[in-house]
Image (cartoon, rainbow, N blue to C red):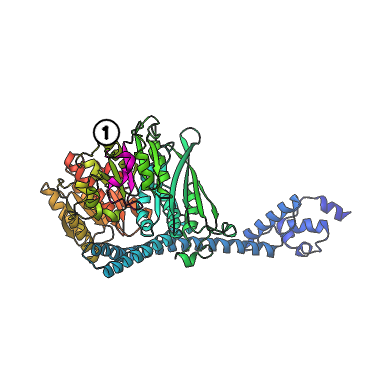
Amino acid sequence: MMAAMTKQSPPPAEPDVAASPPRAQSDANGPADRAEAVVAPRAPTGPNFGRRLGWLIARLGRRLAGEAEISPGEFERLKADSERHRIEAQAMLASSAEKSRFVALASHELRTPLNGILGLADLLGRTPLDPEQANYVNAIRSSGAALAMLVDDILDVGRVEAGKLEPRPAPVELESLIEEVVELLAPRAQAKGLELAAHVGAQVPRVILADARLLARILLNLAGNAIKFTETGGVAVEVAAQAAGEGAVAITLRVRDTGIGIAAADLARIFGEYEQIEGAAQTAAGTGLGLAISRAIARAIGGEIAVDSQRGVGSVFRFKAIFPLAGADAARSESRLPLACRRVLILSGGQVEPPLLMRRLYDLGATVDLAPDAEAAAAALGSGQHFDVVMVDHHRDRPASLTALRGPARGAAELPPAVVMIAPGDRDELPGLRKAGFAAHLVKPIRTASLTKIVRALAATGALPEPTTDTAVAGASAPFAAAASPERSPEQAGTPQSLLPLDVLLADDHEINALLGRSLLASLGHKVTRAANGLEAVQLAAGRIRAGQPFDVVMMDLHMPLVDGFAAIAAIREREEGGGKSLIIALSADTTEAAERLALARGADIVLTKPIDSPRLARILTERQLGAASGSTSRREIRRTAD
């Protein structure tokens, strides 16, 4: 009776509860004992009291929810595992950050000597060389270019693993981007005797919001792979678009080739890191990283990459993503057909380039006929059909003279004005081609703006006007009188001789890179002052600013002793307040986006990555010259030219 009354009474005082530990340790099979065991340890038990109380509360909650009970020992083990996982995760993050720093440092240290190797090989290639020496120089160039690509791949893998592929959308002129990447890849294709051409459909918007660098990287990897694994035929880059809701567009980029193809069994694994298709290692060297990097970039910008292929036939890689339009003027004008009512005859036996060239001319409003050989071209010209312009592929169809195209049916009738399409390496043949009767030339791969300008001018007047600054900037087409001058370097070939040389400050602490920069700028006709570090660069620039004669261009290496390039750029901009501003080009072997953002924030107009692309630098400097000649120094226009 007394025991029953005790069970119904209020809980005893704490000292009494603490004095009865044996009940708390009784058989766990008894419900009453188990309930009391939960309540029993309410008294303070020392430093571990709070932790044990937390376990008891959690245990009681599981009991009420009907879950399986976890012993105190297991609970402690789980907590220890959780803490260990937290520490491991922090270590992994720290390791990833450290790896990213190491990759960036290694990239910088590799690119600095690479810039000297490739640049000096380029300068050496412009000197008189016998065939054996020229082969050695070309081997240096190709080996250096391969090493530069490997550095890029390693850096991109580091970014992917660190989760630092952060798209930075900005207005991008998609057709210009595609043409620039194709031009960059053209020497590789032409060295193998391959065709390389691009077509951007008329429905593709002029401007979209995208990360130009990431888009270019995808195209470089896909088209570069296509060139690498193609021995005959060529590579086509095609861009199409579809509406994707208000203010957005779905862009599809296709890269198709006539290469070795991929077996069905390999299609699923080729996007993995360090993967190569069977036989590829013997066909062409590589790390097997390009496709893995491309897919990671594609997914980072909300897109995807897929492939269709047949072994021994070729492959088609497709990248598709949705992008916002960049304002009301983003779309192309469907009514703008500059070549409407014009008829063009193309003479080319190519497999890839002619169909894409035809499509481009159609998009511009022209009617186009294609002749696969000189006999077919002569027949078309003799058929009585009027042609405004004839375009001849010099690489594949080399008539001794345009008179070979007359044919017996045409007799002595005058031929329409003719354009010859050449590779960059064929420039030394231009004087002979002019004597053969050609009115103008286009350098492959052909830009749409150059194609439009040349065909429209020839169709209207039968001849081209004298060189203008607009023609010179394009650099891809010109009358023979301006283009054939043998005294001018490849970069100078498109530069008007009437423009004044620029006064350039070159700041670089690396002796070989400084020698390279000075030689390149001198070959372009510019005056060069060299600074060996950032402090000297600021002092020289400040002196010229005080004298009212600032440098036209400052080329600033970002990593130098005493004062680095970032601080030097900011110091120069501070001293320019209220006066004329130099065009500041930051030069860096550090390819991280953080370095580029910091350089632009400090006042740089353009950031160029080492090894320096000398034709691109020449275009930037020419744009600066044109701006000076016209009284305009638009940094926006110069940035657009550089990008």
Q: Which residues are magenta?
A: 388-412
Image position, residue 450 (x, y; %): 30, 42
Q: Of the residues shown, which amino acid type is indicated by label 1?
A: Ala
Furthest-right residue in view? 1
Image position, residue 546 (x, y; %): 12, 48
Is there any visible trace of residue 113 in the rendered image? Answer: yes
- Residue neighbourhood size for the residue with mark 1, other residues' Cα within 10 Å, grouped as few (<14), some (14–19), many (≥20): few
**Which quadrant is home to the N terminus?**
bottom right
Vertical placement of residue 445 versus 15, above or below: above
Q: Quadrant of residue 148?
A: bottom left
Vertical placement of residue 76 versus 410, above or below: below
The residue that mark 1 highlights is 460
Q: Is residue 361 left or right of residue 58?
A: left
Q: Is residue 253 magenta?
A: no
492 and 432: which one is in front?
Answer: 432
Q: Is residue 392 magenta?
A: yes
Which residue does the image show at 24% across and 68% down from the upper left? 130
Image position, residue 542 (x, y; %): 15, 52
514 and 492: which one is in front?
Answer: 492
Q: Is residue 560 left or right of residue 170?
A: left
Which residue does the image show at 37% across and 35% down from the upper left? 366
Image position, residue 231 (x, y; %): 44, 60
Which residue does the image show at 44% across and 45% down from the upper left? 238
